Image (spheres, rainbow, N blue to C red):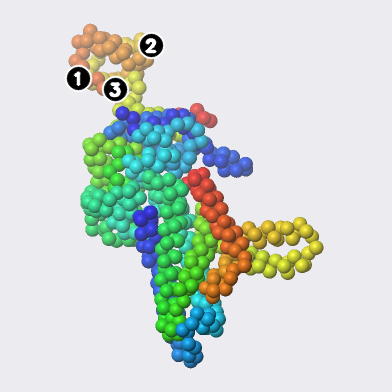
Amino acid sequence: MRGITRDTLVEMFDRKLFYVFAAVTVLSLLVVFLTGSFEVDMSIDTAGERDAEMLNEMLGDPIIRVFEFYLSFLVFLAVMGTAGLIPNMLEKGRADYYLSKPLSRTALFLNKFFGILIVYGLTIMLSGVIIYAAVGLIHDLFCTRIIYLFLFSMIAFFIWFSITAFAGVAFGSNAIALMSAFIIWILQKILAGREILEALTSSKIIKYIVDAFYYIIPKTGEISDIAIKLTAGRPVNDWMPFYSSFLFALALLYVAIVIFKLKNY
Amino acid sequence: MQVIEIQELTKIYYTGLKKGNIVALDSVSLEVQQGEILGLLGPNGAGKTTLFKVLLNITQITSGQVLILGLPPYNPESRKKVGYLPENHRFPNHLTGLGLLEFTGRLFGLSEKEIDSRSEHLLNLVGMERWGNTKIRKYSKGMSQRIGLAQAMISDPEILLLDEPTDGVDPIGKIEIRKVMERIKTEGKTIFLNSHLLSEVESVADRVAILTRGKLVRIGSVSSLTSRQSQFEIEAAIGNEIIEIPEDVGKRITLSTTGMIVELKNDEDINFIIDQMRMRKIKIRSIKPMKITLEQSFFETVTENREAVQ
């Protein structure tokens, strides 16, 4: 594990992806400091618990939403940057090198998968922590529940990466890995408005199919909403998008491992 | 002791109905003994690389049995003591040469101390000590081969599978790699060598196996493959003497005052020829089984089998 994780880190620097994250972080810091000069009335006495809740409601939600968007953007960058890593490992001539080592294919795949997840996940976290620290310093606003946004961003990255990793193993192509993530993203956007789709047809079969797709396809947009609610301290009524998306990712990982074990290189 | 045992190994690539299936290996059986260098020869597409891939579970067996150091290839432990230099390799090119050795060592589960000491030694051994900190993507083909050989040896393997190890290497590099192989052999290691360079195989291999269209058509020592069966070159002061060879014994191919070449039905009949010459008091200087080059032997074997198939 240590070997592959360290190698992923070296590869990340070599592909200059770390510098992309660093540049995005620096630019965002500039934006934070520039917008930080706007006057925000912080003269609320936050001594009591109720006042803290008020502060959250007044200032928390917009900042949480902007920050959630920032983390989602980092996840998007990570998905773009990592989509080619598994097909790259399995390309002709390189697969021979990896597969000739005394590791089972399951261990090799999982080490690579979680190595990438750890390295890129930590990079997202680092960038997020820097930006949140800057926002917190300027607005004197720190909330421990922000951890939910970080946690759910990691889960979203896990889900997206399981899609590109699966496509990478099944088709061995960087392009298809990226396209598969894009197709799933489009599908989840369409299915998010499934009520409109269902209203357009009277066919029960089509409604069932649309519903089935909705439950199967991961719903990272709705997971973001769950994260925002949790961070803002509001109750979450429906955890289904989280469970179904997580299960989808696990199932894809399982199928990817099965394909990887059976494939000839 | 056998370190590699292959019995009735068949590998079929299923390519879809239109193209038909490809039989890459067809009932191949062979054994590799500890400490020997076995050369694997065959024309392009004969199944040589597939055989290596099957041994390492890179490609899976269709039928038959394979054991490496007593373990089947699907068991990752079977690769613990095997070093592999793939053909047309593409090592992770974000690494330096030294980085590749370190990474490979970690994949083999070696300690940092072991990796450090072996990396330095191997870089020296393959003549890459000056290039250890250069990125692999900047290496020439020959340098890539050298570093590939070093990574194959990082775990101090019992068996080395070398697929075209001197491909792209300059003549001096080829000699150096050959010396490395000879040195490895003296340490009691086994080398399974796949090479298109017949002279290279001839000079280093103890035994040679020839694959054609997925079938193992010949296997034996280099001398057995290069000796022309039942043909002998006799150097002797024959002068004007006439030595008759009965038809049931064989025939004379060439004759001169200083010697002749005979082809016998049985190798033992050479005694009959010797007796004939002694009776005539002909001074025999030498009797040698006729030798051909490995290249000739390979060409004849491949051609014969091609004709047999057609």
Are callouts 2 and 1 both on one chain?
A: yes
**Mark 2 and mark 3 residues within 8 Å of each other at the beta carbon:** no
Tell me which amino acid carries mark 1.
Arg
Q: Which residue bears the numbered disc 1? A: B285
* Quadrant in which the N terminus of chain A appears: bottom left
Which quadrant holds residue A13? bottom left
Q: Which residue bears the numbered disc 2? A: B247
Question: Label 2: few (<14), some or many (≥20) within 10 Å?
Answer: few
Q: Is residue B209 left or right of residue B257?
A: right
Q: Which residue bears the numbered disc 3? A: B289
Tell me which amino acid carries mark 3.
Pro
Can you say whether A61 is above or below A104 in the image? below
Tell me which amino acid carries mark 2.
Glu
Q: Nearer the viewer, residue B168 or B287?
A: B168
Q: Chain of mark 1?
A: B
Are callouts 2 and 3 both on one chain?
A: yes
> Does the rendering let one see residue A96?
no
Looking at the rendered structure, the secondary structure element under dot 3 is: strand
**Mark 2 and mark 1 residues within 8 Å of each other at the beta carbon:** no
Give the image location of residue A107, x and y in percent: 43, 49
Which quadrant holds residue B68? top left
Q: Earlier in the sequence, mark 2 or mark 3?
A: 2
Residue name at image x 42 percent, y 74 percent: A129
Can you say whether A176 is above or below B220 in the image? below
Count of numbered labels shown in the rendering: 3
Q: Earlier in the sequence, mark 2 or mark 1?
A: 2
Give the image location of residue B247, x and y in percent: 38, 11
